[in-house]
Image (tube, rainbow, N blue to C red):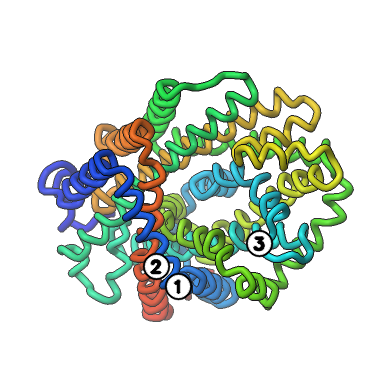
Amino acid sequence: MADHRLTDTYFKHNTVLSASLVLVVVAVAYTLIFEQQAHGVFSWLQNSSSIYFGWIFILLPLLCLFGCAVIMMTPLGRIRLGGADAQADYAWLHWLAMLFCAGMGAGIVFWGVAEPVVHYITPPVNTDLVDNALLVTFMNWGLHAWALFAMIALAMAYFAFNRGLPLSVRSLFYPFIGDRIYGVFGDLVDILAVVASLFGLATSLGLGVSQIATGLSYTLGLELTLLGKILLVAVLAGVATLSVVLGVSKGVLRLSYLNLWVAVGLFVFVLATGPLLWLVGEAPRWFGDYVTSIIWPAQMIDIYRENGAWAQQWTTFYMAWWLAWAPMTGLFIARISRGRTLREFVLGVLIAPTAVTLLWFCVFGGAGIHNTLYGDGSVSSALQVDYSTSFFALLDTLPMAFVTEVLALLLITIFFITSADSGALSIDAIVAHGNTHTTSRQRMIWPLATGAVAIILLISGGLQALQAAAVASALPFAFILLLALAGFARALWQDRKHALPTSR
């Protein structure tokens, strides 16, 4: 429940709303008018943050993993979000489907085949090519990424459901500044979160349309013009708006659950018709290398030491990207997690999605590498022309290619819609000062705004510039997350005496 001091109407006297919209308009106008200059400035910010603060992007996921381990292995894990009598709002499978679709669902389809094959063709170091290809992919997409989402989501959920604070990024600072989160500082934090989230959503939607267009061309022979891509963005934004208007239970949940079964069907099909015996023989070693690297990361350290440019281009970029998405994704995960114990939360947000992600890369990435090693090499050939064709190129080597490619298009499309609508709901909650029961008219603003920005950037060619701006926002969010971890630890320590006995 939002604090009574933040119950102004959504559109009247709302600093976060007005300032966020002004900043978005200014940034988009700057990108439109000075596209090359904007790309240079935003890229410089992104590269500078990676060069000078890349160590923070690598350290933070490790701290988050440590925090998750502490919660899992101590009595703190018995604390329940919302209090001892709180009931979970969603069944386990529904909950897992939504948090995965909100997290990185579209990404693993795009990179599921491409990234392992890229790391095999152009390895960071020239030893154990196949093993390293999967290892570095796991490191970029596995526990470290989900730990970032888990800890910021858990902190926001705890402060909202157990401390009665707004479900918003500003609440992470309450242990340090108290009621001053309701002032100018809190507004600034929320404005940063809204602007960065909207930029991230718009660039994701714009780039996603390009992937869908590639799939339509590869599968159906349909070549989309710029107008076609604009219409496709409009359709996706329209469906996301409808989903947002329907709300979490009727919109996001139904789409996420549908996509869960489409993904399971594709996974089982590729596993059964692909190089099953080879994958079964190789996968245990890949998983073993990954677990070993989590406990004793000597192999990854050697890779980073020998090829620092590769580390900056891939791992540091990924950690920055996950950080930039963490407030928006974390808030949505927090929103749907009332009633879970902290231990259940970590199991659901860290362990389960990581397991699914690694299995996906094993099967799809492994099959792509197998095609490169022992097949006709069509996957790697397609990859070198366009990364986004690699997933379809793999399906083309298997039976029932047309059917599975159409299903893959459906999967990608729904993943982008669920990312857009869950992100829009998060932005809406931030602007509403933690209120998750806003009107349909209010919720419609954000998916429509996201679609409008994506269309403008498609026309102007400024998608890459705004993507760089979104990634550059990872640096301030890194410091926000550091403070959030400290504040969350402090709050748990303060509450441990009365919280633990009520959660068994």
Which element is circle 2 on?
helix
Name the residue located 42 percent from the left edge and 39 percent from the top edge: 420
Q: On the image, which quarter does residue 299 sit in?
A: bottom right
Image coords of residue 106 (percent x, y): 55, 42
Name the residue located 51 percent from the left edge and 50 percent from the top edge: 103
Residue 399, compared with residue 349, is above or below; it is above
Q: On the image, which quarter does residue 374 sit in?
A: top right
Query: Does 25 sit left or right of 36 as displayed?
Result: left
Q: What residue type is labelled 1?
A: Ile
Query: Does 116 sit left or right of 8 as displayed?
Result: right
Do the residues bearing badges 2 and 1 touch, measured as CB atoms within 8 Å? yes
Task: Decide if residue 158 is in sight here.
Answer: no
Residue on which the image places disc 1: 56
Which element is circle 1 on?
helix
Image coords of residue 127 (percent x, y): 77, 66
Image coords of residue 141 (percent x, y): 59, 57
Q: Distance between the residues labelled 2 and 3?
A: 22 Å
Q: Nearer the viewer, residue 89 or 155?
A: 155
Image mark for residue 478: 2
Q: What residue type is labelled 3?
A: Val
Which element is circle 3 on?
helix
Among all residues in the image, which is located at the extreme left?
13
Q: In which quarter of the image is the N terminus?
A: bottom left
Query: Does 237 sit left or right of 6 as displayed?
Result: right
Image coords of residue 487 (percent x, y): 36, 75
Please rate how many residues cluster around mark 2, counting C-alpha atoms within 10 Å: few if below 14, some from 14 to 19, many from 20: many
Q: On the image, which quarter does residue 233 sit in?
A: top left
Residue on which the image places disc 3: 136
Which mark sits nearer the N-terminus, 2 or 3? 3
Residue 240, compared with residue 302, is above or below; it is above
Query: Does 367 sit left or right of 460 as displayed?
Result: right
Q: How far apart are marks 1 and 3 (CA)?
A: 19 Å
